[in-house]
Image: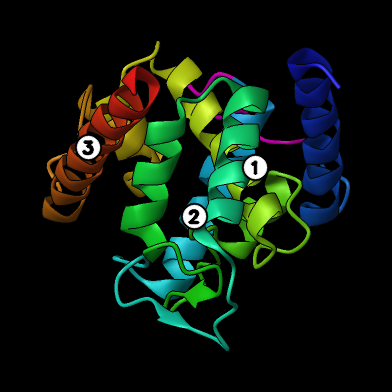
Amino acid sequence: MSVESDAMAVDRRIDALYAAIDGGNMAPTVAPLASNFQALVERQRTQDVAAGGAGWRDGSSTKGAVAIPPSAIKDMIARASAATGVEQPLIEAVIKNESGFQPNATSPVGAEGLMQLMPGTAAGLGVGNAYDPEQNIFGGAKYLRGLLDEFHGNIPMAVAGYNAGPGAVQKYGGIPPYAETQNYVNNVMASYEQYRAQEAFTKAN
């Protein structure tokens, strides 16, 4: 399936989700988000945070940890990178800072899996089981792809959007002045540079 057809399928699923959420009412206009995909994810993120409070990614725990070889996770990340065009080191950096590579990581308010997807966000991304590593990674990578497109390839802004939501990044015209988000962006970018250096070293040897 091409990226374009996959995006169309996601938008069709999102339209159905809006209908289910709103009892058949049309989706509200959310400006200036770029698409139904972004609108639903932002809307659901806002609802999830309202239900669980701020800082919902802090204090992750694990439920019956699943032993998955690092090489298997690495292969899944590589496939997700190829499918979405998101750099493998960026996906790895987000996973490291979200869950520490624990597939069954669960935050206190219910963010799930390797890339810590909230249930509503996961549903909007077409992820049926957020504790399935491959589904989680592909869903999180798809979300990153949308954020990178939204912010014209600006990685720090996309990473900030992953943490605080794209609406907050748009509101402030850059990384929001939230200590949690600023620390998160710094940590993810440091991990990203580390993984990029490792990737370059591996290719050169």
| Nearer the camera: disc 3 or disc 1 | 3
Secondary structure found at label 2: loop
Q: Alpha-carbon distance for marks 3 and 1? A: 22 Å
The circle on residue 115 is: 2
- Which residue position holds label 3? 194
Is residue 22 or residue 142 the one in the foreground?
142
Residue type beneath disc 2? Met
Q: How would you classify the magenta stretch by its main secondary structure?
A: loop
Residue 79 showing in the rendered view: yes
Image quadrant in which you'd find residue 162: top left
- Which residue position holds label 1? 138
The earlier-in-sequence mark between 2 and 3 is: 2
Query: Which stretch did the figure color magenta?
Result: 26-34
Image quadrant in which you'd find residue 8: top right
Residue type beneath disc 3? Gln
Q: Is residue 29 left or right of residue 47?
A: right
Other residues around mark 1 within 10 Å, as few (<14) / some (14–19) / many (≥20): many
In percent of width and height, residue 123 lies at 72, 53
Q: Alpha-carbon distance for marks 1 and 2? A: 10 Å
Residue type beneath disc 1? Phe
Q: Is residue 187 left or right of residue 169?
A: left
Which image quadrant: the N terminus?
top right
Residue at 41%, 44% in the rendered image:
92
The circle on residue 71 is: none
Q: Is residue 84 left or right of residue 16?
A: left
Secondary structure found at label 3: helix
| Nearer the camera: disc 2 or disc 3 | 3
Residue 167 showing in the rendered view: no
